[in-house]
Amino acid sequence: MRLRHPHDREILRLAIPALGALIAEPLYLLADSAIVGHLGTPQLAALGLAGTALQTLTTVFIFLAYGTTATVARHLGAGDHRGAISAGLDGLWLAFGLGVGVAVVGVAATPAIVAGFDPSPAVSAYAITYLRIAILGMPALLITFAGTGVLRGLQDTRTPLWIATAAYAANIVLNLLFVYGLGWGIAGSAWGTVVAQTGGAVALVLIVVRGARRHHVSLRPHLAGIRNSVHDGVPLLVRTITLRLAILLATYVATRIGDTALAAHQVAFTLWTTLALALDAIAIAGQAIIGRYLGAADVAGTRAATRRMIEWGVAAGVVLGLLLLLARPLYIPLFTTDPAVRELLADVIMVFVVYEPIAGIVFVLDGVLIGAGDGRYLAYAGVWTLVAFLPLAGAVLAFGGGLVALWWAFGGFMLARCVTLLLRERGSAWLVTGAPAHR
């Protein structure tokens, strides 16, 4: 694939820093797990439990980044810099309000959340300690989502990368200091996370505030703007929930198949998620680029950029899939010593490598339509594709198809998503130009 297309430089300028920021998070999580893991097995198990709860909240509220990116980019494309900053500030105020509400409810509900996982008493105590502290960082985390969305909408993915990298590095240092230097144990890890998240959020807010002052935009919250942010965010929230439900359903089916299947499924899904990072970077570039082009009423440019990003998605899917396939003998032994799990995992990887190019199209078009502000369609499409996946997953359970069959079924889910997105892209209903009409 030659880098001669006029949109290649623009795509890479946004996608590469976005990929760096996406990769930084799992690397930090690995370091955090290593630090807590040396405290003991109950502490590590507690971190995994609490981390699962926090990750669920993180996934649910990611619409704050996506929706803000699209709206800000549209205003920017229309030449309305003041409107772009104002929309970004509204997104930040919404994030702050939601974050405070989640933190208040979450602290009170922590014991019930942990009890829902039914852990051992030792793990439960540590998990409650960690989660109750870590959830105090939700306002900072959600502000970080919205602030990152503002900068992406302004076509800047480098600054979020540097801030994320600095925050993750600070988190590791603070965790070592609090956990071992001060002897706070697992509570120190949680406080390290909260402090680092807060620092990153403050840095993003200061950058947005500086832009607001430069363009003489009021920092006060605008109820109409916040209401519009909610209006834009709810469909993306529905879209995200349908995706999470499909993933949870696949995990449930794998659990019912057996322990060996569940172990192989966990590793396979981790690998699939890792590959998704590269594809998601192109999607993030799509959100920013498409929003700006449509804001500028450049339909031809929108179409051309979309086609090129689809080509990038397919190429990335093919290359990453082949690399994963050829490297199986090298990395599979790193995850397990169980021959049965190894053999099953190798078979599953063969399956999802086949539809990785389809995943490339899905991720790219998802980002394109988010950038176009087409959240309502994405919500409806998410519901229908989830409905399509239900009988496929049910058939695996009913007929004892095993884990390989489950991953073929999940491939069917991805194919259904691909069809719904391609049908939309082929039409013109999503090509709404100009700045957001409801602002």
Image (cartoon, rainbow, N blue to C red):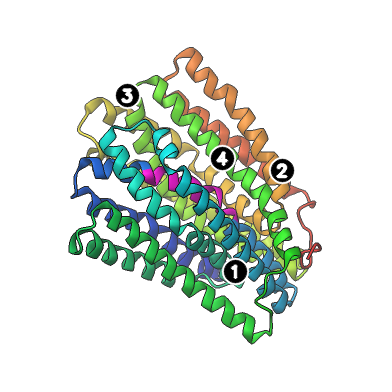
Q: Is residue 130 above or below residue 71?
A: above
Q: Please name the residue shown 70% across and 40% down the image.
A: 380
Q: Which residues are magenta?
A: 50-63
The answer for how far apart the CA atoms under marks 4 and 3 are is: 24 Å
Name the residue tied to disc 4.
243
Q: Please name the residue shown 48% across and 72% down the image.
A: 202
Q: Earlier in the sequence, mark 2 or mark 4?
A: 4
The answer for how far apart the CA atoms under marks 1 and 4 are is: 24 Å
Could you say which is closer to the camera, residue 72 or residue 201? 201
Name the residue tied to disc 2.
423
Residue 318 visible at all: no
Q: Amino acid at mark 4?
A: Leu
- Place of residue 167 in the rendered image (x, y in percent of width and height, measured from the top left): 38, 67
Magenta stretch: helix, strand or loop mostly: helix
Please name which of the two marks, 2 or 4, marks the residue nearer to the observer.
4
Q: Amino acid at mark 2?
A: Leu
- Place of residue 403 in the rendered image (x, y in percent of width and height, measured from the top left): 41, 25
Name the residue tied to disc 3.
259
Name the residue tied to disc 1.
150
Crowding around mark 4 (Cα neighbors within 10 Å: few <14, some 14 to 19, many 20+) is some
Query: Would you say the residues marked 1 and 4 are in contact, meaning their CB atoms lie under 8 Å apart?
Result: no
User: Which element type, helix, strand or loop, lies under badge 1?
Assistant: helix
Could you say which is closer to the camera, residue 143 or residue 337? 143
Please name which of the two marks, 3 or 2, marks the residue nearer to the observer.
3
